[in-house]
Image (cartoon, grey):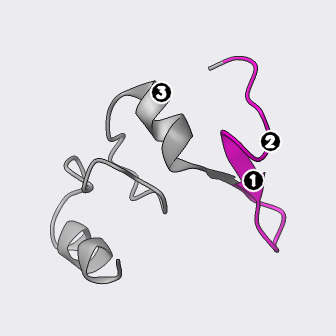
């Protein structure tokens, strides 16, 4: 994705890492399976048991 907007598509956490927002993920259109913090797709492509673990943290 080109032309990402800080504060809309991503932000920098306190460690300086890029964290994609749910708005970014919705634009992307699918769960990548990496267990992203703001995944709006219920982690459908994350393998078990990690998926269940992530869902329990919500």
Residue highlighted by disc 2: 6
Q: Is residue 57 magenta?
A: no
Q: In this rendering, is residue 56 above or below 40?
A: below
Q: Residue at x 25, y 82 (%)?
A: 56
Image marks 2 and 1: residues in contact by CB distance under 8 Å: yes
Magenta stretch secondary structure, dominant: loop
Image marks 3 and 1: residues in contact by CB distance under 8 Å: no
Residue highlighted by disc 3: 27
The numbered mark, 2 or 1, whose residue comes first in the sequence reads 2
| Residue 9 screen position, x and y as percent | 66, 39
| Residue 2 screen position, x and y as percent | 70, 17
Q: Is residue 15 left or right of residue 25?
A: right
Q: In this rendering, is residue 55 above or below 5?
A: below
Looking at the rendering, which quadrant does residue 49 occupy?
Answer: bottom left
Q: Is residue 36 left or right of residue 8?
A: left
**What's the CA distance linking mark 3 and mark 1?**
16 Å
Q: In this rendering, is residue 50 above or below 37?
A: below
Instruction: Point out the stretch of residues depicted in magenta.
Output: 2-18
Quick one: quadrant of the N terminus?
A: top right
Q: Residue at x 22, y 47 (%)?
A: 45
The numbered mark, 3 or 1, whose residue comes first in the sequence reads 1
Residue 11's disc is: 1
């Amino acid at each position: 994705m080109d032309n990402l907007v800080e504060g809309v598509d991503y932000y920098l956490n306190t460690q300086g890492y890029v964290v994609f927002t749910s708005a970014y993920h919705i634009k992307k259109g699918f769960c990548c399976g990496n267990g992203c913090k703001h995944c709006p797709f219920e982690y459908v492509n994350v393998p078990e048991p990690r998926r269940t673990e992530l869902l329990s943290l919500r």
